[in-house]
């Protein structure tokens, strides 16, 4: 699903693949930047054909005009919802999430959502990892310690439980005891997905109801229910049972794909975008159908239901220097908040919620 700058070129690329390559983040190999990793210049890309729903919304507010093929729905939601004439079941809600809500979700995505029993891409090698964000923040390393298999008592800092062989410790201790280790910061940078609710079995490509899991947090469920309303008939409520959190760094892509593992495609996928600005590609029922490109910014929400569920979609270019924020509440009543810039960390979080009916 993820692409990188080193993918080999396709011999006969499809229309969707050509669009992916067209909008991909490439760097200038000019010698003056070659040895300065943090100063690499992205190559310019022609973005004139990319739909910009934020600009469309501003124009619609000014004079009521819309581009050809774009439809606006205003009677089902608090803010305008856009759809595309040639892609029934696709809905785009620009700026649907407040800054404060974005901050809360980014924090949860980095701290809470990767916590076991939720699974991540690290499970296959290291087992369930606890408190990854704080271990990375404290400069800890994850070490392989075979002595742990003799104990059933979990350590407070343990990356694993019940006889698994990895735990967090200090870099000094790992060096003294000559443990095989990997830094928490490296693991955090390489975090690519985590799953909430019913867990997806990537080996068998299905949802495994026997795997231990927690329900999706109630606040997130309620948010998804409200956001999904434009894609549902009146009186029908969205019931999210599973979610995947995708984490992207600069240069990462999400290749064209279908979300086809759910039983009922009439129910929407609710996708929340947080962090980096990216380009979303919405194609047709074949990879040979040329996709529509559109900007996807932090706080935007995409809904895909019905026929849109049969359309290939993915993400191409993402911005090099996004700003990620956290909310720090002030005052005992929590009514005031301060938005604090954490830094340009080159990360995007995409949170997709699904109704399975398994």
Image (cartoon, helix red, strand yellow):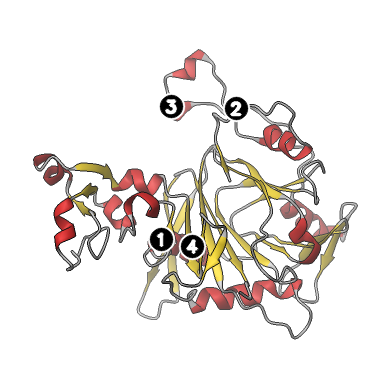
Using the rendered view, name the quadrant where residue 46 is placed.
top right
Q: Which disc number belongs to residue 8? A: 2
The residue nearer to you, when weighing 70 against 85, is 85
Front of the two marks 4 and 3: 4
Residue in the picture at 27% in, 60% down:
160
Q: Which disc number belongs to residue 37? A: 3
Q: Earlier in the sequence, mark 4 or mark 1?
A: 1
Q: Badge 1: few (under 14), some or many (20 or more) residues near its Cα, within 10 Å?
A: many
Q: CA distance from mark 2 to mark 1?
A: 31 Å
Residue in the picture at 77% in, 76% down:
76
Dot 1 corresponds to which residue?
114
* Farthest-out residue, left: 176
> Where's residue 189, x and y in %?
40, 45
Using the rendered view, name the quadrant where residue 115 is placed.
bottom left
Front of the two marks 3 and 2: 2
Q: Earlier in the sequence, mark 2 or mark 4?
A: 2
Q: Secondary structure at mark 4?
A: strand
Q: Earlier in the sequence, mark 3 or mark 2?
A: 2
Task: Report if the CB atoms under discs 2 and 4 are less than 8 Å apart.
Answer: no
> Where's residue 39, x and y in %?
47, 27
In the rendered image of this protein, does residue 169 appear above or below residue 346?
below
Q: Earlier in the sequence, mark 4 or mark 3?
A: 3
């Amino acid at each position: 699903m993820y692409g990188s700058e080193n993918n080999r070129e396709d011999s006969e690329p499809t229309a969707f693949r050509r669009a992916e390559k067209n909008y991909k983040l490439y760097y200038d190999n000019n010698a003056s930047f070659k040895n300065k990793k943090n100063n690499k210049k992205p190559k310019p890309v022609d973005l004139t054909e990319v739909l910009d729903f934020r600009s469309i919304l501003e124009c619609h507010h000014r004079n009521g005009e819309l581009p050809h093929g774009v439809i606006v729905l205003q009677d089902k939601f608090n803010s305008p919802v856009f759809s595309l004439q040639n892609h029934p079941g696709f809905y785009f809600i620009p700026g649907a999430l407040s800054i404060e809500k974005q901050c809360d979700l980014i924090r949860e995505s980095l701290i809470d959502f990767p916590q076991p029993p939720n699974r991540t891409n690290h499970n296959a090698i290291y087992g369930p990892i606890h408190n990854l964000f704080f271990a990375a923040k404290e400069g800890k390393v994850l070490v392989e310690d075979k002595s742990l298999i003799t104990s059933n008592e979990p350590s407070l800092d343990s990356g694993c439980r019940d006889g698994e062989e990895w735990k967090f410790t200090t870099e000094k201790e790992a060096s003294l005891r000559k443990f095989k280790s990997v830094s928490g910061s490296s693991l955090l940078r390489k975090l690519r997905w985590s799953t909430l609710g019913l867990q997806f079995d990537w080996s068998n490509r299905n949802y495994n109801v026997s795997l231990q899991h927690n329900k999706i947090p109630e606040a997130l469920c309620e948010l998804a229910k409200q956001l999904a309303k434009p894609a549902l008939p009146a009186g029908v409520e969205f019931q999210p049972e599973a979610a995947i959190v995708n984490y992207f760094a600069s240069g990462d892509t999400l290749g064209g794909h279908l979300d086809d593992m759910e039983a009922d495609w009439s129910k929407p996928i609710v996708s929340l975008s947080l962090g980096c600005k990216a380009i979303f590609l919405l194609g047709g029922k074949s990879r040979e159908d040329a996709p529509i490109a559109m900007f996807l910014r932090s706080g935007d929400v995409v809904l895909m239901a019905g026929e849109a569920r049969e359309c290939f979609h993915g993400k191409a270019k993402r911005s090099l220097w996004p700003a990620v924020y956290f909310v720090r509440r002030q005052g005992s009543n929590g009514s005031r908040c301060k938005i604090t810039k954490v830094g340009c960390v080159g990360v995007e979080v995409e949170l997709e919620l699904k109704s399975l009916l398994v």
